[in-house]
Image (cartoon, rainbow, N blue to C red):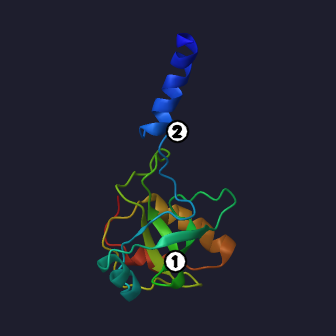
Amino acid sequence: MALSMWRKLPKLMCVGHGFHTSPAYSHIIKLTRLRVVDNSEIGKRAMAEGKPPKCIHVYNKKGVGTIGDKVLLAIKGEKKKAIIVGVKQNQPALSPKFDSNNVVLVDDNGTPLGTRIHVPIPQVLRTILKEKNVVKGADYTKLIALASRFV
């Protein structure tokens, strides 16, 4: 009886005492909280009130967002589109890792809603968005022009 109790004990400890056996994920998926890093009015109000936007949908086949992907956000009771300019997850070579998940709000044809971007954006974003301009038809050159600092 003591041996069977010993086998059950670790399982009970893991569940009951707050130990997590699965790894922590830092992907941008549905319901991920994001940080707006431009100076758009709706973005400034949401971040000042302490209610950051949540991701509703990621516009790619995998459903996991990385740098340069377009996402749909729920912000202040509205739906807005945004481009991911910094992610917290492990990145491939030549893509920097950020401390937070950063987005820039854009409208349907790729024009940014704000006039400044407050954080450095990755240099890789130039080539990623250049490829997406041709395929999708949206124009992201204004987003790159707003950025004053690159990493």
For label 1, the crowd category at 10 Å Cα-Cα, with few meaning under 14, some 14 to 19 and many 20 or more, is some
**Vertically, is 55 above or below 97?**
below
The C terminus lies in which quarter of the figure? bottom left
Provide the secondary structure element on which disc 1 rests: strand
Label number found at residue 16: none
* Residue depicted at x 56% and y 65%: 69
Residue 13 placed where, x, y %?
45, 31
Residue at the location (45% across, 73% down)? 53
Give the residue furthest to the front: 1
Above or below for 73 versus 24:
below
Residue, far bottom: 41
Can residue 94 be seen here? yes
Q: Position of residue 131 (x, y in %)?
A: 61, 66
102 or 140: nearer the viewer: 102
Q: Is residue 38 left or right of residue 1?
A: left
Q: Are marks 1 and 2 in contact (CB under 8 Å)?
A: no
Residue 39: in sight, yes or no?
Answer: no
Q: Residues within 10 Å of mark 2 (few under 14, many from 20)?
A: few
Mark 2, residue position: 22
Left or right for 150, reference 21? left
Q: Give the amino acid at mark 2.
A: Ser
Please, what secondary structure does the residue beneath circle 2 have? Answer: loop
